[in-house]
Amino acid sequence: MISHAVEDYLKAIYELAETTGKVSTSALAERLRVQPGSVTGMLQKLAEGQEGQPPLVNYERHKGVTLTRAGRKIALEVIRHHRLIELYLSTALGYDWDQVDAEAEKLEHVISEEFEDRISAMLGHPTHDPHGDPIPAKDGSVSPHSQVPLSDVDAGQSARVARVRDDDPALLRYLGELGLVPGALLTVTDRAPFNGPIHVRVSGGDDAPSHALGREVTDKVFVDETGS
Amino acid sequence: MISHAVEDYLKAIYELAETTGKVSTSALAERLRVQPGSVTGMLQKLAEGQEGQPPLVNYERHKGVTLTRAGRKIALEVIRHHRLIELYLSTALGYDWDQVDAEAEKLEHVISEEFEDRISAMLGHPTHDPHGDPIPAKDGSVSPHSQVPLSDVDAGQSARVARVRDDDPALLRYLGELGLVPGALLTVTDRAPFNGPIHVRVSGGDDAPSHALGREVTDKVFVDETGS
DNA sequence: AAATTGTTTTAGTCTCGGCTAAATCGCTCG
DNA sequence: CGAGCGATTTAGCCGAGACTAAAACAATTT
């Protein structure tokens, strides 16, 4: 039986690895709000695999961790749960987007296959959530997105907001106020040198106000480039 | 923080006490599918109350356990969650009524107040579930379900045994042999006139034997009417 | 009153998943 | 190369909450 704690570890490894490749002990510790020593202990257990079950991670001391096939399968199931639940809460129960994450965090570990199937059907078997994040299919397939952080977009370029990394409710609210939500069109009007603030005009005529965004923010907003 | 395990204990004590008064260690152990020794250990902890918090149960060794006001409050919150979730799953997600319990058993421990409020509103703030069991209100008030003595049930009616006035151990034993225990479904097959004996068939097919019960007995068995 | 029987409690152990504090590793810099 | 430093791992500990086996208790029967 897979415990909630293990599910959380696997999910965190998956999500951190998406941008980092290998995942370090300290990155995991920070993400899971746990001491590094605890992480090491857990990774050792996960790398062993218990009683005939295959190991869930590849782990070599001091060299970071990646998921095995078996580990990724579980991570994707949990993420599928998470995103379906988020979507369900917001569309069926009228939650605001910045409230759904905490609830999904708890529900994702306890719902049955039955529940998963029913809400997926009710939502029309969606493949992406409102952040633009893909919802893994039951077979573990993930439709990839070719997305770039806003901090990589050149001045003059236009792009469509694809997703926002959803750690921080306050950030989500802030971006909402600016209209920087998934689907919104934006143009980078100006970039200060040396990773200075990026000026962005949101989907409007030339007279729309433009906003200056710091690195903190532009690393978390991902866009599909649309050229020009 | 109240753990899931503690919530399960309190809920079980509440539900067993409804029909029994005090709850025995072994009854709890059986209900929770746990060894008696584990129950004793937990009851001792619950009776202590931790760090300024009041105790959640009244417990004296060898004398059974009851809930304190604080313990009952928590039990009712959990039961409220459970019944609202059951109802929501069956009406909003199309679950069959007999699939609903297992899912609710897990969800009841993790949903937020927000979630509770939203599904309650969506269901029109129901006060009873389809079994006729009351759904406790947020303030902890429970509208009792209408219980009538078996002697008031008409011929042809079915009902569920709610409780037995337990003055007399011999009577309890006798009823136990007949299967007339709380929770059992029964049908009144016949009534003799002038307060004569009442014939009752216990939750079985039409071929189950029916028993004739005198006034002495039928005044002490209380049922929830469930119609037809 | 003593013995039997069934229930309950104690005592000791286990696993899980955290924690802290003290090594140790790997890397960079002088 | 060796020192120092940050990251990581080890080692030992804790609290929850389960388990088993043995002891104590209550209630009945003889």
Image (cartoon, coloured by chain):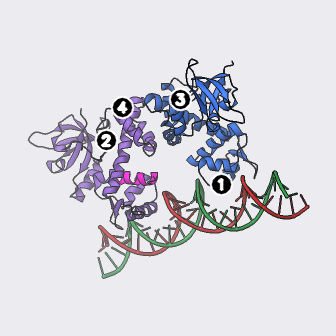
Chain colours: A blue, B purple, C green, D red
Query: Does B4 appear in magenta?
Result: yes
Q: Amino acid at mark 3?
A: Leu
**Magenta segment, prevailing SS (helix, strand or loop):** helix
On the image, the x and y values in percent for residue A96 come to 46, 33
Crowding near the residue tagged with mark 1, few <14, some 14–19, many ≥20 C-alpha atoms within 10 Å: some
Residue positioned most to the left: B194
- Marks 2 and 4, Cα distance to the nearest angstrom? 15 Å
Crowding near the residue tagged with mark 3, few <14, some 14–19, many ≥20 C-alpha atoms within 10 Å: some
User: Which residue: 57% across, 36% down?
Assistant: A166
Along the line of sight, the residue nearer the viewer: B197 or A97: A97
User: Which residue: 62% across, 41% down?
Assistant: A11
Region in magenta: B3-13
Left/right placement of residue A137 relative to residue A101 reads right
Which numbered marker is on residue B101? none
> Which secondary structure, mark 3?
helix
Along the line of sight, the residue nearer the viewer: B145 or B67: B67
Query: Does A113 appear in magenta?
Result: no
Which numbered marker is on residue A178? 3
On the image, the x and y values in percent for residue A214 come to 63, 36
- Marks 1 and 4, Cα distance to the nearest angstrom? 44 Å
User: Which residue: 58% across, 48% down?
Assistant: A5
Q: Are marks 2 and 1 on the same chain?
A: no
Q: Does residue A151 lie above or below A56 as drawn?
A: above
- Marks 3 and 4, Cα distance to the nearest angstrom? 32 Å
On the image, the x and y values in percent for residue B45 come to 42, 63
> Which secondary structure, mark 4?
helix
To which chain does the residue with label 2 belong? B
Which numbered marker is on residue B122? 4
